[in-house]
Amino acid sequence: MSDRLEVRALAVGPFQSNCFVTRGSSAESTVVIDPGDEPGRVAAALDEWGAEPQAILLTHAHVDHVGGVAELVRRYGAPVYVHPDDLPIYNSAPQHAALFGIRLEEPPPPDVFFEHGQRVIFGDLDLEVRHAPGHSPGGVVLSGPGQAFVGDCVFAGSIGRTDLPGGDATTLLRSIREQILTLPGDTVLHTGHGPSTTVEREAGSNPFLIGDPSWWVG
C-alpha cells in the first residue's frame, strides 16, 4: 500500500459539490470519487495526469454527487461502486434532479456494492470502506493513508443535513462518532462541500460535536 495519496478537488455543478480525482503513486491507482456534475472538467483533470479512472466511487447517491457518472462511464468504462442501501436514491436520481429543475442523465447500474470493512484496492491505492448512514442510508467513508473522503457526513464546522428521505440525525451523529472521529486526529477529511478539515479540528470546534470529548479517541 502506498503511503502517498494525491488528491485533486473540483467543486462542480450548481450545488458546488466536491468531486475528487485521486491516486496513489501510479496512474493505475487513479479513481474518481463523487462526480456530481461537469464530467468534462473531471476528464480534463484526468488528462493532466495522463490517467484513466479505474473506478468511480460514490460516498452516497444524492443528485449532487452522481450527476457526472453516466458520461464518465461512457467515456472510460469504469465500474461504479455504491453502497446497496443507497440504490433506491441512485436509481431515482433523474427524478430527484427534476425537482430542482436540473436534467440528469440516468446513471448506469452500479457494478460493485460497498460493504462495511471492505478494502477497495487499485494499484497501490488502498481505501477502507466505513458504512456511515444518517445523511443517507448508504453513506460511506473511504479512508486512506492520512486522508478520508467523508461525503456529506461532516463538513468544516458543520454536519450533513438529515431532512432528506432516509436521513436521521441520531444515526448521523453515531456514524460520525464511530466511523470518523475514531480516525487519527491528524487525518485530513475531504468533505462533500466546502474546504477539507481534520478529525482533531472537528472534534474540538465543530458545534455539533463538541461537548462530549469521549467521541474523539483518535
Image: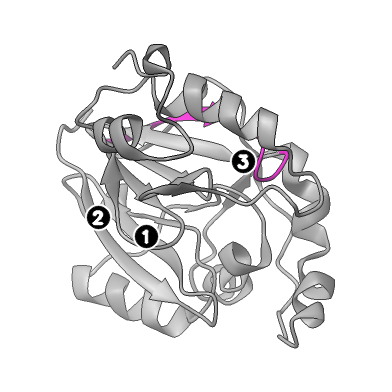
| Magenta span includes 12 | no
Residue found 59% across the figure and 24% down from its top: 174
- State which quarter of the image contains the N terminus: top left
Q: Secondary structure at mark 1?
A: strand
Location of mark 1 (residue): 20
Rendered image: mark on residue 139: 3
Q: Residues within 10 Å of mark 2 (few under 14, many from 20)?
A: some
Q: Position of residue 188 (x, y in %)?
A: 25, 40
Distance from the alpha carbon under mark 3 to that under mark 1:
16 Å
Q: Is residue 119 visible?
A: no
Residue found 58% across the figure and 77% down from its top: 71
Nearer-N-terminus badge (2/3)? 2
Q: Is residue 179 visible?
A: yes
Q: Position of residue 75 (x, y in %)?
A: 51, 76
How many marks the image carries: the answer is: 3
Nearer-N-terminus badge (3/1)? 1
| Quadrant position of residue 24 | top left
Rendered image: mark on residue 7: 2
- State which quarter of the image contains the C terminus: top left
- Closer to the eye: label 2 or 3: 3
Q: Secondary structure at mark 3?
A: loop
Do the numbered discs 2 and 1 sit on residues whose CB atoms are within 8 Å?
yes
| Magenta span includes 135 | yes
Highlighted magenta segment, given as a residue range: 124-137
Residue found 57% across the figure and 63% down from its top: 65
